[in-house]
């Protein structure tokens, strides 16, 4: 990453947030994955051809929305996902998400990222996150930079479809999302999902990162808080 640092330590997070749906075990078919998905490969390294699974084709005509305003964000609908989301797998369906502000949520406990447009979930995926002395930070972060062909100047690794969240380099980017991999604090998502997210996200859109916090349908949160 341009100016990538050692990925900041976590901010205090008092905001209770996530979709009203049990995804705590969403990345695997058994409870052991949560304990075994620890870094065993170079963190942040991306793969040009990760395994992906989509629930529906993307809406090619959809245009990026305006940055999310600091007004209460209300969950209006969530994707119908039967079964857990496994590593390398994602869902994308823009049929319910009309023009409106985009808010991205990341639940580190469930290791799931969700994309909401006008309050409707249009995308969900399993993620990689940081561990140990390079954890993924908690908090509310605006997207400050977009770079479709980013290459880390520290790890000399491609990080395609990068959305920067912090000045020291924490970002969302395409990655090899497989069991046994981790990042240096960033949020890694499958390349194809990252490409679709890059298309709908705008500078200033908010990314809410929590660790097991949830918000049910109809609940609201101020992403600028």
Image (cartoon, helix red, strand yellow):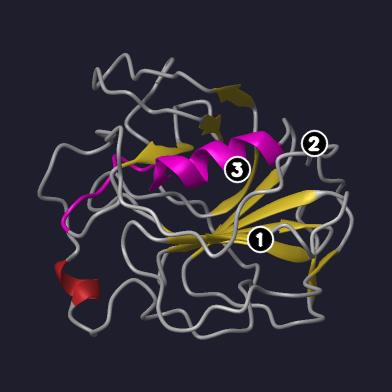
Label number found at residue 93:
1
- Mark 2: give few (<14), some (14-19) or many (20+) Cα within 10 Å: few
Task: Determine whether the residue tagged by mark 3 lies in a helix, strand or loop.
Answer: helix
Residue 83 lies, with reference to residue 145, above or below; the image says: below
Give the Cα distance between marks 2 and 1.
14 Å
Q: Nearer the viewer, residue 59 or 109?
A: 59
Marks 3, 2: nearer the viewer = 2
Whole-percent x and y of residue 122? 68, 60
Whole-percent x and y of residue 191? 41, 40
Q: Residue shown at 28%/75% (left/top)?
A: 28
**182 within the magenta span:** yes
Is residue 121 shown left or right of residue 159?
right
- Where is mark 3, residue-wise? 197
Q: Residue shown at 84%/58% (left/top)?
A: 118
- Mark 1: give few (<14), some (14-19) or many (20+) Cα within 10 Å: some
Whole-percent x and y of residue 50? 30, 45
Picture quarter with the C terminus: bottom right
Segment colored magenta:
180-201
């Amino acid at each position: 990453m341009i100016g990538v640092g050692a990925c900041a330590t976590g901010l205090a997070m008092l905001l209770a947030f996530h979709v009203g749906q049990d995804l705590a075990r969403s990345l695997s078919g058994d409870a052991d994955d949560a304990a075994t998905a620890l870094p065993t490969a170079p963190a942040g390294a991306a793969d040009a051809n990760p395994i992906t699974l989509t629930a529906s084709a993307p809406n090619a005509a959809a245009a990026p929305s305006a940055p999310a305003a600091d007004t209460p964000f209300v969950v209006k609908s969530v994707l119908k996902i039967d079964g857990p989301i496994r590593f390398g797998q994602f869902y994308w369906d823009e049929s319910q998400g009309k023009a409106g502000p985009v808010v991205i949520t990341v639940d580190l406990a469930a290791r799931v990222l969700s994309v909401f447009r006008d309050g409707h979930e249009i995308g969900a995926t399993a993620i990689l996150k940081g561990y140990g002395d390079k954890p993924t930070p908690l908090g509310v972060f605006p997207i400050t930079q977009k770079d479709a062909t980013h290459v880390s100047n520290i790890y000399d690794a491609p990080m395609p479809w990068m959305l920067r969240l912090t000045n020291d380099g924490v970002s969302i980017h395409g990655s090899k999302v497989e069991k046994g991999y981790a990042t240096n604090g960033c949020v890694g998502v499958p390349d194809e999902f990252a490409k679709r997210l890059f298309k709908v996200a705008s500078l200033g859109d908010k990314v809410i990162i929590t660790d097991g916090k949830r918000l049910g349908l109809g609940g609201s949160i101020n992403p600028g808080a």
